Amino acid sequence: MPRRAPTVDRGQVPDSELEDRFGRRFAYLRLSITDVCNFRCEYCLPDGYQGRPTGFLHQAEIGRLVRSFAELGIRKLRITGGEPLVRKDALAIIAEAAATPGIEKVALTTNAFNLARQAEALREAGLSAINISLDSLNPEGFERITGDKRFDKVMAGIDAAIAAGIPSVKINTVLLGGLNDHEVPDFMEFVRERPVAVRFIELMQTADNGEYFRRRHVSGQTVADRLQAAGWVPQKRGETDGPAVEYTHPDYAGRIGLIAPYAPGFCDGCNRLRVTARGGLRLCLFGNGTHDLRPLLQDDADMPALKRSICQTLVGKEVSHHLHEGDFGDTPHLASTGG
C-alpha cells in the first residue's frame, strides 16, 4: 500500500531558500507543461495517451511559477511532459524561462518527433540543454518499444540539436531486458565520435506496469560493471546535475551515464523538485499526492504567498523513495508527472 504523507508542523518556515529537513538544498526544478504524449512507449503508455488534454498551466501562470522558484534559489529548470513540444507555445515558454533572472540553465526533455525543424529556434530561445528519448539504435527495435515509426526523424533531431549548437545534448535510454540491453556496446560506439551523453535509465515500477517491470527490469549495476571493466571512469556530479552518474573514457568524444534508482543512497543527493502540468508541487517522483499551487499563480501579488507555500510544503519531503519495498506511491506512469 502507498505510504501516507507525513504529518508536518507548518509553523515558521523560511521563504527565502529551498532546504528540507535533511539539509538537502534544491536548485533544480522539473516542470511538466503537458501530460500528453504522441508516442506509445510500452514501458509507459502502451495504449497511448488516455488522459484529459485540457487544464494545463497557462504561459502566464508558468511565468509566475518560474519567477517564484528562481527567487527561492532554483537555477536549473527542465521543461518536460508528456511530450512538451506538442504544446504550440512551448518555444515561448522556454524563451520566457531563459530570460528569468536567476535561471542559469533551461533544459528540455523530448521524444524529438519534431526536433529537426525546431532545434535552431530552441537554441535562439535560450535552450541550454536537451535530453532526447531514444530506446534503440535500430528502426525495428525503436518501433517495437515506442510504437512509433519516426526513428529517422528522431535521429535527424539529434543531429540537428548538435548542429544548432545546443550546449548539452543527451540521450535517454530506458534499459529493458530482452529488448535493448544487448545494445549497450552499440550505444558506446554511438558516442565515440559524437559529443553527446547516453544515459541508461533503470526501469522503474509504477502503478500501471507491475507485470512488465518484473519481466523487463535489468539492474543498472550490470551497466556500471560493464563500463568500469572497459575503462570508463565515473565523474563527480555538479550541484545542479540530475541523478545520473556519468562515465568518461579518453577514447570517446561522448559520455555514458547511468540512472539507477534502486542503487543504495540514490536519494541522498536529491536536489530537484517537480511541478505537474496542472500546477501540483510533487516532492518525489514516487511519493503520494501533490500540493496545488495553481490558486496562487493568478496574480503577481500572490507570489510572496506562493513562495511561502512552496517552502512549507517542502518540510514534508521524505528522506527517500520506497521502491525497494514495492511502494511506488501514487504514480500511475511516468508521463503523468514529467518523469
Image (cartoon, grey):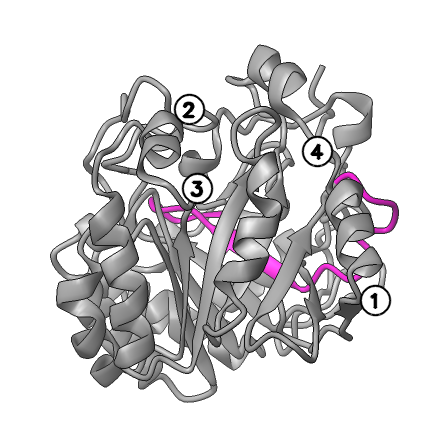
Q: Earlier in the sequence, mark 2 or mark 3?
A: 2
The amino acid type found where label 2 is placed reads Glu
With respect to residue 118, does 86 lie above or below? Answer: above
Residue type at tag 3: Ser
Is any part of residue 140 visible from this angle? yes
How far apart in space, not on screen, are marks 1 and 2 (Cα)? 38 Å
Category of crowding for the residue at label 1, using alpha-carbon neighbours closer than 10 angstroms: few (below 14), some (14–19), many (at least 20): few
Q: Looking at the image, is mark 1 or mark 2 earlier in the sequence?
A: 1
Of the numbered discs in the image, which one, if any, rests on residue 136? 3
Sequence-earlier tag: 4 or 2: 4
* Residue drawn 62% across the image and 27% down it: 177
Residue corresponding to mark 4:
5
| Occupied quadrant, residue 92 | bottom left
In the image, which is nearer the foreground, mark 4 or mark 3? 3
Q: CA distance from mark 4 to mark 1?
A: 19 Å
Camera-side mark, 4 or 1? 1
Q: Which mark is residue 75?
A: none
The picture quadrant where one finds residue 325 is top right
Residue visible at 47% across and 85% down in the picture: 104
- Mark 1 highlights which residue? 23
Disc 3 secondary structure class: loop
Most common secondary structure along the magenta stretch: loop
Q: Mark 2 — residue?
A: 42
